[in-house]
Image (cartoon, rainbow, N blue to C red):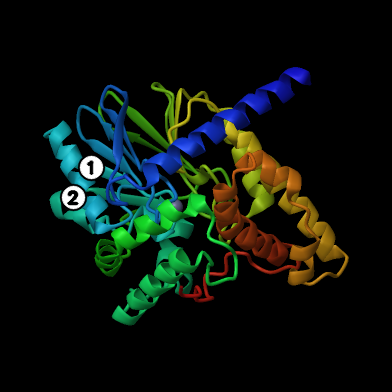
Amino acid sequence: MNALRSALRSALAAMSAGAIALYASAASAGDPFAFEWTELDKGVWAGVRPVSYNSPPTGSALIVIGKKGVFLFDPAGTPLVGERVAAKVAELTDLPVTHIAVSHWHGDHSMGMHKVLEKYPNAEVITHEFTARAIQSPLNSFTPPTDDDVKATRERIETALRTGMRSNGQPVLPEMRPYYENVLAHLDLTTAELRGLKPITPTKTMTDAMTIDLGGRKVELRHMGPGNTNGDIIAYLPKEKILATGDIVVSPTPYGFYSHPASWVNVLTQLKSLPARHIVPGHGAIMTDTAYFDALIEALSFVAAEVDRLAAEGKTLEETRAALDWTAVEQRVTGGDPLLAVFFDGWFKTPIVEAEYKIATGQDSEDLSAPAPQP
Ligand SMILES: [Zn+2]
């Protein structure tokens, strides 16, 4: 037990040190669509953003080169990412992209794929069957920002930086300034990218498992149950022991929109049993072990148990939010880091409680017929 506690403390210290390094690089990082590329094994490359929470979110990409063709996992959240991923493939090999798989329906993993398909038009586009339906659904409706939207965003951020207060009445933490400054610096580029997003059209769907043979190299696609979404799939290279998780794993803090907490715990537990030397999360730095999975399991188990208990007592959603004591779980995930606490609150606590409350009260946490609220 003491060994476990001490391991946890070291992990938290390391996470904190990592967060400080992130602050330092947040202001000076390139545009928000720039990847850092790492060769995980010969011919297997991961593209990951140096500051995963920079706005707008865009998922990590995996390139796997075989003897016959190239496989891409989550190739492009925006058109510029798509152009860059296609250029990276062309730089690495003359072989064409033959297969593309998308981890789940959220557009930040696929809505720039048309730029990859311009260069590699014959690639098979594979998703889970739920994902294919979700992409066409009202829940995936998206309105590009108008000039007025962009102006309002610029004014809101400039005001926050000038007054030190966010529009929700919370103070602007010193650690948030690089994040806001980065949004302002790239607002025109981001707007152009958001206006260029296109939903994908899958050419093949799967349910539980599929194996792709690239010639001398195999990629396994697996769906292990509902988690971050109902149609999550992971990509796994059994020989090379490389795992790409999509948003089942997102660091430094998770996303929890329309999710399925109890089942997600089960998925993470299954993933932990896959031997993996390199783990590429949907967003965030490449991992070499599953220590962070345990923090996610704790957070999701807490939500599933506590929200169910409070809902069973007849509490409303707002009463449930107010009654939850996140202290231990938040410390576990954020290490007490104030900037990470802001993201943990907005991208996990708020949406995941609503999702579990829906499940606990017999509703669908991911109702495809309900249009998504527009920002
Ligand atoms: Zn994502």
Point 26% across, 63% down: residue? 193
Point 19% across, 39% down: residue? 88
Q: Which SS class for mark 2? A: loop
**Looking at this rendering, what residue extends furthest in the bottom direction?**
148
Residue 49 in which image quadrant: top left
Nearest the viewer among 48 and 183 is: 183
Q: CA distance from mark 2 to mark 1?
A: 7 Å
Q: Which SS class for mark 1? A: strand
Residue 119 location (% of width, % of height): 14, 50
Would you say residue 75 is visible in this rendering? yes
The answer to whether the residues at label 2 and label 1 have Cβ atoms under 8 Å apart is yes
In the rendered structure, find residue 88 and report the number of the disc placed on it: none
Report the side of 321 relative to 349 (left or right). Answer: right
Q: Earlier in the sequence, mark 2 or mark 1?
A: 1
Report the side of 116 relative to 151 (left or right). Answer: left
Residue 243 location (% of width, % of height): 45, 32
Residue 68 location (% of width, % of height): 19, 31
- In the image, is residue 250 above or below residue 169? above
Residue 374 location (% of width, % of height): 46, 75
The amino acid beneath tag 1 is: Thr
The amino acid beneath tag 2 is: Asn
Nearest the viewer among 111 and 99 is: 111
Would you say residue 142 is visible in this rendering? no
Residue that numbered label 1 is attached to: 98
**Looking at this rendering, what residue extends furthest in the left direction?**
94
Report the side of 117 relative to 263 (left or right). Answer: left
User: Is ligand 1 less than 8 Å from the beta carbon at label 1?
Assistant: no
Could you tell me how many numbered marks the image carries?
2
Residue that numbered label 2 is attached to: 122
Point 52% across, 75% down: residue? 369
**Looking at this rendering, what residue extends furthest in the front direction?**
163
**Looking at this rendering, what residue extends furthest in the right direction?**
313
